[in-house]
Amino acid sequence: MKFALIDSVRTEAKKGAKGICPNCGSELIAKCGEVKADHWSHTNKRNCDPWWENETEWHRSWKGNFSTDWQEVILKDEVTGEKHIADVRTKYGLVIEFQHSHMEPIERSKREAFYKKMIWVVDGTRLTRDYPRFLRGKEGFRLTSKKGIFLVESPDECFPPAWIGSPVLVVFDFKGLEKIKDPRDWRYPLYYLYPKSNKGESFVAFVTRESFINRIITGK
């Protein structure tokens, strides 16, 4: 976790510090080293939030584009009492989940049902085959009558199958943490896979990172 409560104040991890988990109320200790990003860890093994995954530098980099008040927001279902920690929740009520590890469609659907108004941002660098598959598949993109929108007849040949058919926007990041300045590099943009796409056909758009982040911040 990036934040713990120290004297009821959300605080980032600092070497030697102890804090309280804002989600489950148990003790956290700061883990600060040279390999992983500074973070908080529960002192005892605890199933605080089964949806929470160990954060990579990619996660932290993305979350850092948004206000700290929007990061690691705890959401609760008032009917069931179920609680989960959203990576980012904007003041407009939009949840953004940054996903690095593999996820089965059933698990994905559970999270979409809980968060409702959300966007996925998927790390396209996790598997070495993902970007080459996208490059092969993009040759079949067909421009539609709407500027910047492409029709993809076989989306499962371009993107990981687990994300095909999501009812929310899925954004693929094939650049990751690599420094790429050439906007002509196909890894430079982000790729929208539009909601309710199916295995028959999907709609895809390219967008700059700056535009995507700005639209989130401004609520567009």
Image (cartoon, rainbow, N blue to C red):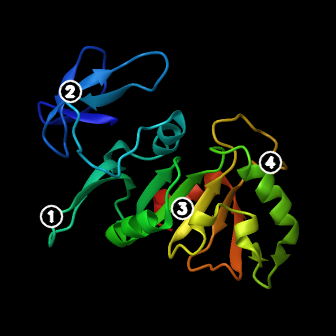
In this rendered view, identify the residue nearer to me: 128 or 94: 128
Q: How far apart, in angstroms, are the residues tagged by discs 1 and 3?
A: 32 Å
Local crowd size for mark 3, using a 10 Å CA cut-off: few (<14), some (14–19), many (≥20): few
The quarter of the picture where the N terminus appears is top left
Q: How far apart, in angstroms, are the residues tagged by discs 2 and 1?
A: 24 Å
Left or right: 151 as drawn, with respect to 45:
right
Which residue: 77% across, 75% down?
150
Question: Which residue is the site of mark 4?
Answer: 183
Query: For numbered disc 2, what is the local secondary structure?
Result: loop
Q: Give the residue type at disc 2.
A: Thr
Q: Position of residue 122 (x, y in %)?
A: 57, 54
Q: Are marks 1 and 3 in contact (CB under 8 Å)?
A: no
Which corner quadrant of the image does residue 29 belong to?
top left
Q: Give the residue type at disc 3.
A: Arg
Left or right: 14 as drawn, with respect to 198:
left
Label located before the other in sequence (2 or 4):
2
Query: For numbered disc 4, what is the local secondary structure?
Result: loop
Query: Mark 1 against mark 4, which lies toward the viewer?
Result: 1
Question: Which residue is the site of mark 2?
Answer: 43
Q: Is residue 161 above or below residue 217?
A: below
